[in-house]
Amino acid sequence: MDAQKKAVEQLMTKGDRSQGGNQDRGGAGMRGFNAMARVKNKQPAPVQITAEQILREARERQEEDPKPAKQKITDPDELAEYRQRKRKEFEDGIRRNRHAMPLWVKYAMWEETQLEFDRARSVWERALEVDHRNVTLWLKYAEMEMRHRNINRARNIWDRAVAILPRVDQFWYKYAYMEEMIGNVAGARQIFDRWIQWEPEDNAWTSYIKMELRYNETDRARAVFEKFVQVIPKVSTWMKFAKFEQKSGSQDRAREVYERAIAELGEYAMDPELLLAFAKFEEKVKEYERARAIFKYALDSIPKSAAEDLYAAFVAFEKQHGDREGIEDVIVSKRRFQYEEEIKERPYNYDTWFDYIRLEENDGDADKVRDLYERAIAMKPPSTEKRAWRRYIYLWIYYAVFEELSMKDPARARQVYKECLKMIPHKHFTFAKIWVMAAHLEVRQKDLAAARKVFGRAIGECPKERVFKSYVELELQIGNIERVRTIYEKMLESFPANCKAWTAFGELEQSLGELDRARAIFELGITQPLLDMPEVLWKAYIDFEIAEEEHARARDLYNRLLERTAHVKVFMSFAQFETSIGQFERARQVYKRADGALKEAEDKEGRVLLLEGWLAMEEGLGEQGKPDEVKAKQPRHVKKKRPLLAEDGSQSGWEEYFDYIFPDDANPQALKILEMAHKWKKQKVDE
């Protein structure tokens, strides 16, 4: 030890001498360094080193991070000091954030590793006092006791957990699992009995039943199923009960369960899955007549739209055990009889007519189908409201399609459309799809003149936008531009507020190279006193001028539009246009103009959006940009409070909201006080 002390003193003496010598030679050293730092030869070196090579070499020569040394505790006093230090760290952390549950868990688990179980339990109990509804705390606490085979303590914890949080299924599962693992089946059964009193979900009942079956307690499992179907009377629960009885080998009991399900569920028993399972069960036990009766009952009771799988299963059953053609005829006859009964009760239920017609079309008798269509279209709605005719009109459409496609008789289809157009009260409403389909029928028959007559009659009697569009598409496909122009003129006379029509007409002239015509159409459109979507028309007009590189005209359009509206998106679009053509100073003037207009309108959200776009433009210009000027205009994002008013006008509280304070709007004195307050709050948080 004395030799080590002497060596340390010698090293300290040498360090002091070298420090003094360095101080004496400091001035001379700096002068020498400056002299050496001068570069005389500024030619590039023969061997160039890239930054990538430097980084790669630095990575290769990098030493591994030193790992902290493992602390070995061999002395009881040192162990006590370590424990005291760790406990103080945990307690300080808990004191800082009492609701940090992960810290509580770490603390308790650390005490467990130290075999200080009383202390660990104390930590768990303290944590539960803070948050007794935390599921993780209860689970970790009980698992600690289970790991160390403290069964009674774990049982006590589970009892407390399920009493406080009975809707947490995980507690019940683990509690019952623990009792079963230690061989206490009666205790596990008692836990499940307590659990099902809360009427849990299906999985709880299934777990209880599986436990009873593991110990061959079939009667107990059956008793649980009886409670199950009473508490949760669903189709799935009854089917599980029936499958259980099938696996138990009791066919009579399984049949009884299916019959009880149909009787007790009432209207909910008309489920294809339940009846199909019942029929397959009877087929499996070779009761074919019973299965056939169940299939027939199901097909008569369940709507056809929901019985596709059932019908397919019945067909497969008859293929295997009966006469397929005979049974299909019987089913069709019964369905036909059922449709007739429904039509007698509700003759204006057009969905029934559709199903009935579809049934006859599948049967393939054209005369019956025509007769049924005639009966259906005779059921004219008694009301003159259009909504009452929406389903009815499809009877005519399906009738015409049937004649044209299925029967290959376009003359009858033409007559169907003709009679339909006569029946519709065009003074009250009309259906554009009928006019369009009638015209398309003539086009398919290569009678263009007849198709034009249909469209012309539609425009004359009841002009609708869809009719005009279909007529325009037809003439464009033919290439008759003059007719297209005439149709657009008629359309705009009927719908002068339709911006899409103005836009389409202008774009048509643009595509034809008639720029003056297109410009005149756009000008006429934007001067209309009432438009449904003016922004669409203005945008189309501006895009037209930009596409034709008429920048002065486009700029004039933007200025005219800003005379009507001061919306921030218009200003930003204007500025982006100027930027796209390289007029950065004009774009900057547009932004300044917009900033002033939005400031007068007190549109703070719009100003923020505008300044973001302005700043992005200035930063994108590089050296030509002036981002500092825009940054100086950026607002402060502050939190404020405002009173909440009840319905009677009284103040019911306060709500916080965020506001923007712009440099040119804020009071300098108030802004300074606010800034000082922010600094004070930040200082308090740091402390």
Image (tube, rainbow, N blue to C red):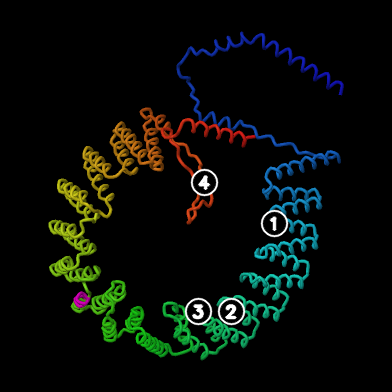
Q: Residue at x 21, y 60 (%)?
A: 473
Q: Distance between the residues labelled 4 and 2?
A: 54 Å
Q: Distance between the residues labelled 1 and 3?
A: 44 Å
Give the side of residue 183 with respect to residue 280, left or right.
right
Give above or below for 157 relative to 386.
Answer: above
Question: What separation in Å lies between label 3 and label 4 (alpha carbons)?
Answer: 53 Å
Tell me where the magenta segment starts and ends, as one range.
417-423
Q: Where is residue 207 in the image (x, y as percent from the top left)?
A: 66, 71
Q: Which callout, 3 or 4, points to the residue nearer the camera?
A: 4
Judge the density around disc 2: few (<14), some (14-19), many (≥20) Cα neighbours within 10 Å: many
| Neighbourhood count class around disc 3 (C-alpha, 10 Å): few under 14, some 14–19, many 20 upward | some
Please state, as top left, top right, bottom left or bottom right, where the N terminus lies in the image.
Answer: top right
Q: Do the residues labelled 3 and 4 touch (CB within 8 Å)?
A: no
The disc placed on residue 132 is: 1
Name which residue type carries label 2: Trp
Which of pointers 4 and 2 lies earlier in the amino acid sequence? 2
Estimate the spatial distance between the alpha carbons at disc 3 and disc 2, rounded to whole Å.
12 Å
Q: What residue type is labelled 3?
A: Asp
- Residue found at x 21% / y 71%: 426
Q: Percent position (x, y) of residue 637?
A: 48, 39
In the picture, measured across the screen, residue 629 lies left or right of residue 420, that is right
Secondary structure beneath disc 4? strand
Q: Nearer the viewer, mark 4 or mark 1?
A: 4
Ranked by sequence position, the earlier of labels 3 and 2 is 2
Frontmost residue, 194 versus 550: 194
Q: Mark 4 points at which residue?
A: 656
Numbered circle sitting on residue 238: 2
Q: Around disc 4, counting alpha carbons within 10 Å, would you say few (fewer than 14), some (14 to 19), or many (20 or more)? A: few
Which amino acid does the dot numbered 1 rest on? His
Quarter containing the C terminus: top right
